[in-house]
Every structure is written in C-alpha cells, then in structure tokens.
Image (spheres, grey):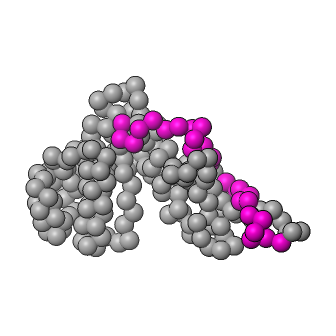
C-alpha cells in the first residue's frame, strides 16, 4: 500500500492471491495507516480484485476507483512496486553469502524502513516519507547495519559455560526500534529471531 501525500510505502506480504488474503492485507494496511494518523478517502485499485475486497472497502466507508485492465499508468502503487522490487533485490544481493535464501521474508521490515527513508513525500520534499509518518529516525539510538550481514550475538554469562565462546553467529535482520542500541537478528542455530 502507498499513501499519496506522504509517499510512504507499507509492505504487507501475501500468503497467496486468494480473496481472503487480499482482504486481510487491506485491513492490516488500512489500520496501520490510521494508527499513523493517515485517513484514506479514495483507494485506487488494480482491476484484479474480488467482490469480498470491495465489500470490505465499502464497509469502511471508503470510495474506490478501479484502473482499466493492463493500464498501470493510473496506479501510483504500480510505480511503488517497481521501487520496492529494485530496493529488495539490492538488499538481498548484499546479504552474506551464507545467509539462508529461504529467510527472505525476514528482510521485509528493513526493506520498508530503508526505502521510506530514501523517499521524499509529496507534501514536504525536505524530509523523508519515513519521517512524515513515523518521526525522525535517530541513528544514535537505533543504529542500522546492512541486512543479512553476519553478526556475533553476545551470549550472557548465565547461559554459557565459563570456557565457552562468548557469542553465537547470526544475521542482522533489522533495527530494534523499541530498544536502545539493539538489533533484531536471525539465529540459525535456534532458527529464531
């Protein structure tokens, strides 16, 4: 989903192209934008939508417009999809060569955050789309590293032996915005975050 004024792109992965998954993604995105203070008035949609999705949109009291078949020029989301694909490919290409290929979905939040830090909003091109909706990003409080790079995660003394290694190898996934100077890491040894 993309908000026109702020130019913010919200990434919501779909499990499949079934109507129920589209409705869930719509509701998740719509609620997220509402929580950020953005109230939608008009949705511009691809013509490949279901009646279930139209009913969900109408239930929320929103207007919508459908694009003509195969006419992607009318949809700002189509251009946003191209930007997301290019940015995600770039992020995926700089991951460590040992980064598990099936863990691509863990890089979605990092992709969304860094992409929106690079995008200027339509209403104020002096700040980023990220800043418009989520506030100023404090790099000192929440440092960022390249997604998928190898990291050594400290093991607490209470969970390791006195002669054991002091850390376990993992991969940087994203910043941890609710913590001070911490990262979110994927740990292959436990297959967890």
Report which quarter residue 157 is drawn in.
Answer: bottom right
| Residue at the spot 63% in from the left edge and 56% down from the top edge | 172
Decide if residue 27 is on the left or right side of residue 148: left
Q: Is residue 124 visible?
A: yes
Q: Position of residue 171 (x, y in %)?
A: 66, 59
Q: Position of residue 133 (x, y in %)?
A: 35, 41
| Residue at the spot 21% in from the left edge and 54% down from the top edge | 45
**Start-end of magenta stretch:** 132-161
- Residue reaching furthest to the front: 158
What secondary structure is the stretch in magenta mostly built from? loop
Decide if residue 158 is on the left or right side of residue 109: right
Assess whether residue 69 is covered by the magenta stretch: no
Report which quarter residue 60 is drawn in.
Answer: bottom left
Assess whether residue 136 is covered by the magenta stretch: yes
- Residue reaching furthest to the top: 126
Above-or-below relation of 67 to 23: above
Above-or-below relation of 10 to 121: below
């Amino acid at each position: 989903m993309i908000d026109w004024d702020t130019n913010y792109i919200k990434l919501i992965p779909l499990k499949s192209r079934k109507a129920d998954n589209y409705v869930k993604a719509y509701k998740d995105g719509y609620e997220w934008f509402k929580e950020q203070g953005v109230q939608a008035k008009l949705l511009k949609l691809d013509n490949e939508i279901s009646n279930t999705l139209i009913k969900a949109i109408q239930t929320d009291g929103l207007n919508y417009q459908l694009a003509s078949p195969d006419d992607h020029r009318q949809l700002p989301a189509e251009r946003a999809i191209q930007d997301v694909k290019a940015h995600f490919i770039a992020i995926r290409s700089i991951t460590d060569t040992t980064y598990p290929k099936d863990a691509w979905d863990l890089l979605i939040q990092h992709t969304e955050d860094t992409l929106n830090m690079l995008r200027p909003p339509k209403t104020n091109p002096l700040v980023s789309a990220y800043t418009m909706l989520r506030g100023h990003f404090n790099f000192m409080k929440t440092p960022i590293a390249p997604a998928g790079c190898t990291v050594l995660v400290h093991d607490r003394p209470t969970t390791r032996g006195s002669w054991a290694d002091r850390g376990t190898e993992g991969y940087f996934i994203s910043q941890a915005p609710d913590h001070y100077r911490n990262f979110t890491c994927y740990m292959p040894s436990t297959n967890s975050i």
